[in-house]
Amino acid sequence: MIRSLYTSISGMITQEAKQNVITNNLANANTVGFKSDDLSIRRFNDVLIENYDKKVGDKNVKNVIGSLSQGSKIDSVNTNFTQGMLQTTDKPTDFAIEGSGFFVVQRNDGAGNGQYYTRDGHFHLNSQGILVNDSGDTVMARNLQTGELGPINVGNGKLVTDVNGNMSINGTRLYKLYTVDFANYGQLTKVGDNLYQGNNPTENNALVKQNSLERSNVSVINEMTNMITTMRSFETNQKIIQSLDETLSKLVNEVGSVR
């Protein structure tokens, strides 16, 4: 019976974690370029149930009755990188990638974190005329004259970008948006601010659309359905624990008592 309590509690813990993932998805349903997460759950290794009631000759031998589940546990949180819908805007500093690839930003926080990757192309110009994201991180591009990576200095000029990411300022082509891709998206880790970290990025020629943003790929209807299912599962485990607790209480206080 005590084992049953552990099994039910493990179910409540995993369902609570799944609820947190669903809540985060819903909270970011309108976040530009956000990719939804899903929590994978797996069970602990089953335990064999055995006794020695079986007799062979004059000896009791081990008899395997069956197996008993020890509950569930969190396996991993997986990100869904499918394309979100593209939405047209009227801002020349808004960008979206159609297909695979990520924008690259540089965070200069003194911690040596270096480059981060994002699908969020909601950029703007800072006070120095440099293209940055909403967190103030510098958007990276390749200088077409020197070939070096660096910031995009738009100043007060007119910014025009073609589908290949080539950026012209006041009619002069100066930069190419630096976009990368990964052979395995499973290695990417969310680090907050709609950014990812990952190893071994490869520069790619992503299809870039100016005056556009990629919407979140969160399906609100699916997430609400998952939330209801998760809540019901949590409540079921909760009721089982209450029932076991009442049974244990009777066992301790009533069974075997002298009247």
Image: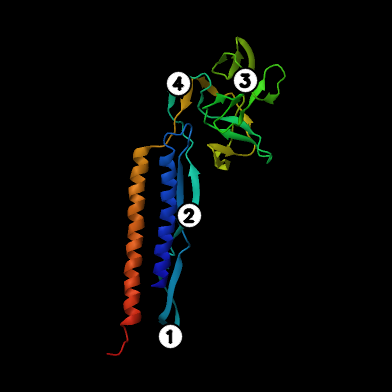
Q: Are marks 1 and 2 in contact (CB under 8 Å)?
A: no
Marks 1 and 2, the one that precedes in the sequence: 1
Q: Secondary structure at mark 2?
A: strand
Q: CA distance from mark 2 to mark 3?
A: 42 Å
Q: CA distance from mark 3 to mark 1?
A: 84 Å
Marks 1 and 4, the one that precedes in the sequence: 1
The residue singled out by tag 4 in the image is 89
In percent of the image, x 46 and y 50: which residue is there? 40
Q: Of circles 2 and 3, which is in front? A: 3
Left or right of 197 in this view: 210: left
Q: Of circles 4 and 2, which is in front? A: 4
Residue 168 location (% of width, % of height): 60, 14
The residue singled out by tag 3 in the image is 176
Q: Secondary structure at mark 1?
A: loop
Callout 1, which amino acid? Gly
| Mark identifier at residue 74 | 2
Marks 4 and 3, the one that precedes in the sequence: 4
In percent of the image, x 61 and y 39: which residue is there? 198
Residue 86 location (% of width, % of height): 44, 25
Callout 3, which amino acid? Lys
Image quadrant containing the N terminus: bottom left
Q: Of circles 1 and 2, which is in front? A: 2
**Mark 4 Cα-neighbour bin, 10 Å: few <14, some 14–19, many ≥20:** few
The residue singled out by tag 1 in the image is 57
Q: Is 212 drawn above or below residue 238 in the view shown? A: above
**Mark 1 Cα-neighbour bin, 10 Å: few <14, some 14–19, many ≥20:** few
